[in-house]
Image: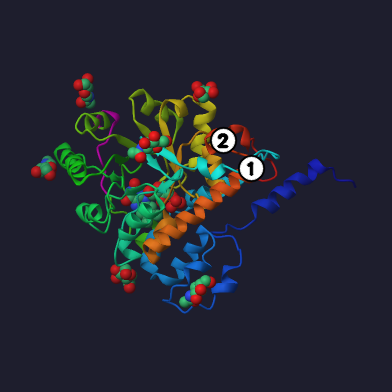
């Protein structure tokens, strides 16, 4: 009997579906660093890409600390999907294009502030688990690499301590979780403004506790565990109560992106909280695609940032191609901060280089001119 190709397709499909999830693809780090004694940090020069920092953290940190950083919600489908979604969208390279000035097009303005690259450090709580100096390495590394650091509300260091670690002129944004009690919210807004932060990043994806199995085993679940009264009116009221711009972080649908534009949000931040809050929530790439397909004007009407699963230069390019202005990275920088500012700076340098060389090989001569024509986002039968 002859089997047609069509009859065989389901078999190929099953074979691809069975491909195991790889937290970090095998690029040989085990062969090089596998004999590193527990509790010893490998030479930073042996870290050649951001996933290597995860490898180092897993071997260096204790299980409870590592579990807090690594954790995703429930069965961690969204955590895995954040990483894997990037591989479902392919690039469409152009050749014979002058790309020799690509590096000069990396600098990016975020809410009017100049930074050296279109990526930033996402707000992550409890840097102290990875480094006794807490957030200092993140503040200093961000300064040395001239990128934006968004400081978590639940940082290990206090807001004044973090401000004290800044270099002169360094711009930091403050992420906030707010309470239902507006008096308390007003106090938080005033405190952030007084401390010298340039903007508020308001996390809107965590109205309830996160469902964090991996972390709860070690008593290191979510620090924000209440049901919070939180509405668009509340957001507007907050904006009326501070001079700082307030960026909603955790937009996950085109409806909310459109709503944010309607109320005049200065920027929006697409995120499923690194897959830590609601398992099943879409990856930033899927959210950006939904907005691009249904309300593309959003990208022209407000600044759009996105994070979740970005590990390589090419990942960032796929989001930028859809109209995202800057992408955030959470875990990679938390793992890099085990080395303090040197690790954070090394991570920034690796990422900058990858964004530049990947854009060049994509045939993009000016990063500001990247567009959806550089990606192929049609559903692909073979790899779905
Ligand atoms: C250890 C850890 C702590 C986090 N803490 C916060 C937080 O305090 N506030 C917040 O808005 N998001 C928090 N997040 C989510 C990050 O801001 C970001 O959305 C996420 O890490 C991006 O995914 P990535 O880690 O795959 O880059 C945290 C993430 C991690 C990994
Ligand atoms: C770290 O790597 C650099 C460059 O390869 C090398 O010069 C240095 O001696 C190494 N340090 C250690 C402690 O292995
Ligand atoms: C930011 O960069 C622009 C050029 O893109 C420059 O004109 C401006 O002076 C810079 N602003 C600051 C505060 O450095
Ligand atoms: C794990 O490490 C963190 C940070 O160093 C420390 O606070 C915590 O007590 C350690 N936990 C265990 C179980 O050793
Ligand atoms: C609201 O917050 C303020 C300031 O923190 C506090 O004094 C007050 O008791 C709180 N009100 C309620 C109902 O919890
Ligand atoms: C915010 O201020 C504007 C202008 O003063 C006002 O029209 C609006 O009702 C206020 N919104 C809220 C939610 O307080
Ligand atoms: C967004 O702006 C660009 C550049 O001005 C323009 O080419 C494009 O048509 C606009 N897209 C939408 C959907 O408004």
Check if residue 82 falls in the magenta segment: no
Q: How many marks?
A: 2
Check if residue 226 falls in the magenta segment: yes
Q: Secondary structure at mark 2?
A: loop
**Image coords of residue 257 (percent x, y):** 41, 30
Observer able to see residue 155: yes
Q: Is mark 1 within 8 Å of ligand 7?
A: no
**Image coords of residue 208 (percent x, y):** 31, 45
- 333 relative to 360, above or below: below
* Pointer 1 residue: 362
**Image coords of residue 178 (percent x, y):** 24, 42
Observer able to see residue 210: no
- 54 relative to 13, above or below: below
Q: Residue at the location (30% across, 62% down)?
A: 134
Which contiguous range is marked in magenta?
Answer: 225-234
Q: Quadrant for the C terminus, please.
A: top right
State which quadrant residue 180 falls in. Answer: top left
Q: How is the image coloured?
A: rainbow
Q: Is 301 left, or right, of 193 in this rendering?
A: right
Label 1 environment density (alpha carbons within 10 Å; few <14, some 14–19, many ≥20): many
From the viewer's side, name the closer residue of 230 and 335: 335
- Label for residue 140? none
Q: Which secondary structure type mostly characterizes the magenta part of the structure?
A: loop
**Image coords of residue 159 (percent x, y):** 22, 52
Label 2 environment density (alpha carbons within 10 Å; few <14, some 14–19, many ≥20): many
Q: Secondary structure at mark 1?
A: helix
- 331 relative to 42, above or below: above
State which quadrant residue 317 falls in. Answer: top right
* Pointer 2 residue: 370
Mark 1–mark 2 contact, CB under 8 Å? yes
- Pick whichever of labels 1 and 2 is earlier in the sequence: 1
From the viewer's side, name the closer residue of 31 and 368: 368
């Amino acid at each position: 009997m002859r089997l047609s190709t069509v009859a065989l397709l389901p078999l190929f499909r099953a074979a691809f579906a069975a491909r195991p999830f790889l937290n970090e693809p095998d690029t040989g780090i085990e062969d090089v660093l596998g004999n590193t004694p527990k509790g010893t940090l490998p030479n930073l020069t042996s870290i050649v890409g951001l996933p290597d920092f995860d490898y180092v953290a897993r071997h260096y940190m204790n299980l409870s600390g590592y579990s807090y950083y690594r954790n995703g919600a429930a069965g961690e489908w969204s955590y895995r999907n954040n990483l894997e979604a990037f591989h479902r969208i392919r690039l469409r390279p152009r050749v014979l294009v002058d790309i020799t000035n690509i590096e000069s097009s990396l600098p990016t303005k975020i809410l009017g502030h100049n930074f050296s690259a279109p990526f930033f450090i996402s707000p992550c709580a409890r840097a102290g688990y990875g480094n006794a100096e807490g957030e200092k390495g993140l503040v200093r590394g961000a300064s040395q690499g001239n990128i934006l650091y968004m400081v978590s509300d639940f940082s290990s260091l206090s807001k004044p301590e973090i401000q004290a670690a800044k270099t002169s002129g360094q711009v930091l944004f403050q992420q906030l979780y707010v309470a239902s009690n507006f008096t308390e919210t007003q106090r938080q807004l005033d405190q952030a403004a007084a401390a010298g932060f340039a903007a508020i990043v308001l996390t809107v994806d965590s109205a309830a506790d996160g469902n964090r199995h991996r972390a709860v085993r070690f008593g290191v679940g979510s620090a924000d565990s209440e049901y919070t009264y939180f509405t668009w009116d509340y957001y507007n009221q907050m904006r009326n109560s501070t001079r700082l711009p307030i960026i909603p972080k955790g937009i996950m649908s085109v409806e909310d992106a459109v709503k944010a534009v309607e109320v005049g949000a200065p920027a929006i931040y697409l995120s499923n909280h690194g897959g830590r809050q609601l398992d099943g929530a879409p990856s930033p790439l899927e959210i950006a695609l939904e907005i691009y397909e249904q309300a593309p004007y959003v990208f022209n009407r407000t600044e759009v940032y996105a994070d979740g699963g970005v590990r390589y230069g090419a990942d960032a390019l796929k989001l930028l191609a859809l109209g995202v202005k800057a992408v955030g990275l959470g875990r990679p920088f938390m793992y890099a901060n085990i080395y303090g500012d040197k690790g954070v700076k090394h991570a920034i340098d690796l990422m900058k280089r990858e964004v530049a060389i990947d854009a060049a090989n994509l045939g993009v001569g000016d990063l500001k001119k990247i567009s959806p024509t550089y990606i192929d986002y049609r559903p692909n039968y073979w790899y779905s």
